[in-house]
Amino acid sequence: MSDTVRPALARLTAPTLVAAGAACACAAVVWADPTTPGGVIPPCPTFTIFGVYCPGCGMSRMLYSLVHLDIPAALHYNALGVVAVAGLLAAFAVWTVGRIRGTAAGPRWSRFRWAPHFALAVIALWFVVRNIPVAPFTALRI
């Protein structure tokens, strides 16, 4: 290999490993088929113990639906999860392009110090809204 190709391939090692890990996680969810009652994946412990839907309830079914390209079902199982997956895919794409170019592409996270607080607020709001026992909020339940 030439000297210019080898560093480019080395820069793609981390994105390749992340993509392989994500593919393995998706394959495990497809194999487990969380839409089948009594399957390998256990029910949500928060719902089982407390009877409330946590922000993560339905994530495995949402991922299963996304892998099968069933977007309406994925949104039904966990709409916030679909938004999170879309954000992660966008961040992964920006990161990978930056690695290919050899530059730090994308936003500087030091400019977004409020992002963790915003994410926690959105998750807390999702937790509350999802458990309101009045229509139209009951449609957010699984």
Image: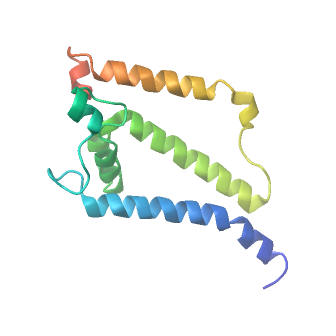
Placement of 2 over or under 133, stated as above or below: below
Question: Quick one: which residue is furthest to the front in this view?
Answer: 49
Residue at 66% in and 67% down: 13
Q: Residue at x 32, y 57 (%)?
A: 29
Residue 4, image quadrant: bottom right
Q: Where 60 falls versus 111 (above or below)? A: below
Q: Position of residue 36 (x, y in %)?
A: 16, 53
Q: In percent of the image, x 24 and y 52: which residue is there?
A: 34
* Count of marks overlaid on the render: 0
Protein image colouring: rainbow
Left or right: residue 78 versus residue 106 is: left
Q: Residue furthest top?
A: 134
Residue visible at 53% across and 61% down in the picture: 19
Residue 104 vertical position relative to residue 23 in the rendered view, above or below: above
Q: Position of residue 24 (x, y in %)?
A: 43, 64
Q: Nearer the viewer, residue 39 or 82?
A: 39
Q: Position of residue 117 (x, y in %)?
A: 58, 23
Could you tell whether 67 is left or right of 20 in the image?
left
Q: Please identify the quadrant where the C terminus is shown.
A: top left
User: Which residue reaches farthest right?
Assistant: 3
25 vs 109, left or right, is left
Inspect this view and state whether residue 127 appears: yes
In front of the other: 64 or 42: 42
The answer, for residue 142, to whether it is visible in the render is no
